[in-house]
Amino acid sequence: MALQGVTYELTEENKDYAVRYCQQGGFYKNRLADFLGISRPTLDKLLEDNPDFFTALKRADAVFCKNLIDAVSRKNPIFILRTKYKDEFNDDMRGLNDPETVIKRMTDLMDAETDELPQTV
């Protein structure tokens, strides 16, 4: 716990490092406190006393989230489908580039699993 009357200030260089750290790994207070070499209550006090620094960290976290969403949206799920559902999505490469074929396979797979569920009235 932060001691009463003891102050801790980050240099501008350390603040810049903290912002870059959050851009790369997200804004998690415990990890950021460890990265800065301070306790979590001390970090909470720093964020409370310095709203501009807190805003910069939140902005860096938003950049991290956007980059994460962009990276995930560019991924191709075919590898996962071929690994998990070998019978439905075998190693036959025909039709993997045709989105309609892939959508039909996924729809058929979902319909087959839905048919196995108990019907409720």
Image (spheres, rainbow, N blue to C red):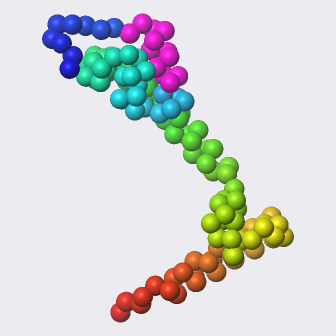
- The x and y percentages for residue 113 are 54, 81
Name the residue at the right extreme. 94
Residue 83, percent from left and from top: 67, 63
Q: Is residue 24 above or below residue 10?
A: below
Q: What residue is at 61 percent from the left and 48 percent from the top? A: 72
Residue 60 visible in rendering: no
Q: Which secondary structure class fits the magenta region best?
A: helix
Magenta span includes 111? no
Q: Which residue is pictured at 42% across the width and 88% down the height?
A: 118
- Residue, x 45% and y 12% (percent of image)? 14
At horizontal 35% and vertical 29% (from top left) the residue drawn is 30
Please say whether residue 87 is visible from this viewpoint.
yes
Q: How far across and down, in percent of the image, does residue 7 sit? A: 25, 7
- Residue 19: % across, % down: 48, 22
Horizontal side of residue 58 vs 72, given as left or right: left
Residue 16 falls inside the magenta stretch: yes
Query: In the displayed image of the protein, which residue is found farthest to the bottom?
Result: 121
Start-end of magenta stretch: 10-21
Residue 5 placement, left or right of 16: left
Along the horizontal axis of the image, is 23 left or right of 36? right
Task: Tell which residue pokes out farthest to the left in this image.
Answer: 4
Which quarter of the figure has residue 24?
top right
Quadrant in which the C terminus appears: bottom left
